[in-house]
Amino acid sequence: MIEGVKLKELKVIPDERGRLMEILRADDELFKKFGQVYMTTAYPGVVKAWHYHKKQDDNMAVIKGMMKIVLYDARKDSSTYAEVNEFFLGEYKACLLHIPRMVYHGFKCTGEKEAIVINIPTETYNYKEPDEYRLDPYKNDIPYDWKLKER
C-alpha cells in the first residue's frame, strides 16, 4: 500500500426502514480536519484522472455504483515511490479511502449505472487558486492502463 494511504471498511446497518452507513467521524483515526463535503459522479466507463493536491488530503467513499480508484505515488522521497494501488469500491465493498496529499489519483466507473462518490477533503475548495494539479488520463508517465483487465 502506498505510504499514507489508508482504507477503512464501512459498516452498513440495515433494518426494515432502510440502511445507515457512517463514513467519517471526528473520532476516527483517519480524521485530520474538515474542509468540506462534496459529491462527484462518473457515468459507466468514464475515467476521471489524474490529479493530486499539495495542501489537502482526500477521504473518498463510493456510495452508489462501483468505482475503480487508482493511486500513483510520484513522491520521490516516499518509501513507496512509483507504486500503483488499485481499489474497487462501492456498493459491493463499502470503504473509506484516505488519499494523502501529493499522491496522484483518479477513478473509473466500472458499473452499468452512474457511480456516486462522496469526498471529505481536509481543505475547502479555493475557486481562485485551486489546489489541483492535473495530467491527461492516458498521455502521461504513470504506469497504468485504464482499459478493462480480463483475467
Image: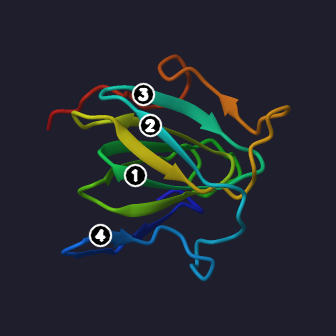
Which corner quadrant holds the C terminus?
A: top left
Horizontal side of residue 138 vs 18, given as left or right = right
Q: CA distance from mark 3 to mark 4?
A: 29 Å
Q: Which residue is mark 1?
A: 62
Of the residues tagged 3 and 1, which is closer to the observer? Answer: 1
Which amino acid type corresponds to the residue marked 3 in the rendered image? Val
User: How many angstroms separate mark 2 from mark 3 (CA)?
Assistant: 11 Å
Q: Quadrant of residue 145?
A: top left
Provide the residue designation for mark 4: 19
Tag 2 secondary structure: strand
Q: Quadrant location of residue 44? A: top left
- Residue 65 higher or lower than 8, as above or below: above
Mark nearer the viewer, 2 or 3: 2
Residue carrying label 2? 41
N-terminal-most mark, 1 or 2: 2
Dot 4: within a 10 Å radius of its alpha carbon, few (fewer than 14), some, or many (20 or more) residues?
Answer: few
- How far apart are the alpha carbons under marks 1 and 4? 15 Å
Q: In this orientation, which residue lies closer to the viewer: 101 or 140? A: 101
Measured in 3D between alpha carbons, the distance from the residue under mark 1 to the one under mark 2, in whole angstroms, is 9 Å
Identify the residue at the far top of this view: 139
Q: How is the image coloured?
A: rainbow
Q: Residue furthest right?
A: 128
Three-letter amino acid code of the residue under disc 4? Arg
For this view, does 78 lie left or right of residue 61?
A: right
The label shown at residue 47 is: 3
26 on left or right of 90: right
The mark nearer the N terminus, 3 or 1, is 3
Q: Residue furthest left?
A: 151
Residues at marks 2 and 3 touching, judged by CB atoms closer than 8 Å: no
